[in-house]
Image (cartoon, helix red, strand yellow):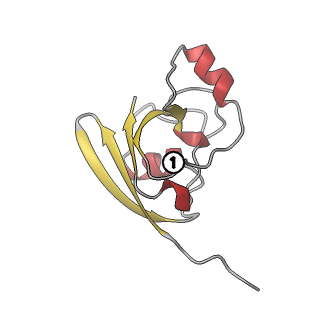
């Protein structure tokens, strides 16, 4: 049985004027939303628990080394419904925790 090696991942999250440097590893969390929910505890964040339907987990990618991996669920329609736009605006529940997120910096909206 071959296992994928654990990859240490560093994520920077800007929230309410504070910068949070969070260390995680591949597959510790299902999505960026769950990491933020568990580590920062923002009120009213991630109401649909990762289904991509509520729009309460919006983030803006400020910088990243790689293009993050995304789940293919509801993001486009949810962003249209909320009226939020921008190339770098995403639902954090649709961003996977994998090696491509290492070094990412996001601003919670």
Which quadrant of the view contains residue 14? top left
Query: Which of these two is toward me, 18 or 12?
Result: 12
User: Residue furthest toward the bottom?
Assistant: 1
User: Residue furthest toward the left?
Assistant: 17
Quadrant location of the C terminus in the rendered image: top left
Inspect this view and state whether residue 61 appears: yes
Query: Which of these two is toward me, 104 or 14?
Result: 104
Residue drawn 61% across the image and 15% down it:
81
Q: Quick check: 84 above or below 56?
A: above
Query: Which of these two is toward me, 51 or 108?
Result: 108
Residue drawn 64% across the image and 30% down it:
75
Q: Which residue is mark 1?
A: 32
Q: Quick check: 45 above or below 20?
A: above
Q: Quick check: 58 above or below 4?
A: above
At mark 1, the secondary structure is helix
Q: Is residue 79 left or right of residue 89?
A: right
Quadrant location of the N terminus in the rendered image: bottom right
For the residue carrying disc 1, how many other residues have a C-alpha within 10 Å: few (<14), some (14-19), or many (20+)?
A: many
User: Residue furthest toward the right?
Assistant: 1
Inspect this view and state whether residue 42 appears: no
Residue 25 in percent (x, y) is at 49, 66
Q: Is residue 85 left or right of residue 52?
A: left
Q: Is residue 60 left or right of residue 70?
A: left
Residue 86 in percent (x, y) is at 49, 23
């Amino acid at each position: 049985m071959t296992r994928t090696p654990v990859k240490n991942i560093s994520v920077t999250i800007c929230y309410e004027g504070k910068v949070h440097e969070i260390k995680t590893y591949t597959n510790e969390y299902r999505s960026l939303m769950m990491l933020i929910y568990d580590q920062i505890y923002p009120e009213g964040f991630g109401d649909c628990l990762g289904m991509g339907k509520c729009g309460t987990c919006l983030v803006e990618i400020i910088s990243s080394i790689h293009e993050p991996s995304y789940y293919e669920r509801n993001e486009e329609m949810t962003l249209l419904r909320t009226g939020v736009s921008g190339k770098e605006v995403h639902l954090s529940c649709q961003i996977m925790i994998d090696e491509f997120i290492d070094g990412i910096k996001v601003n919670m909206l």
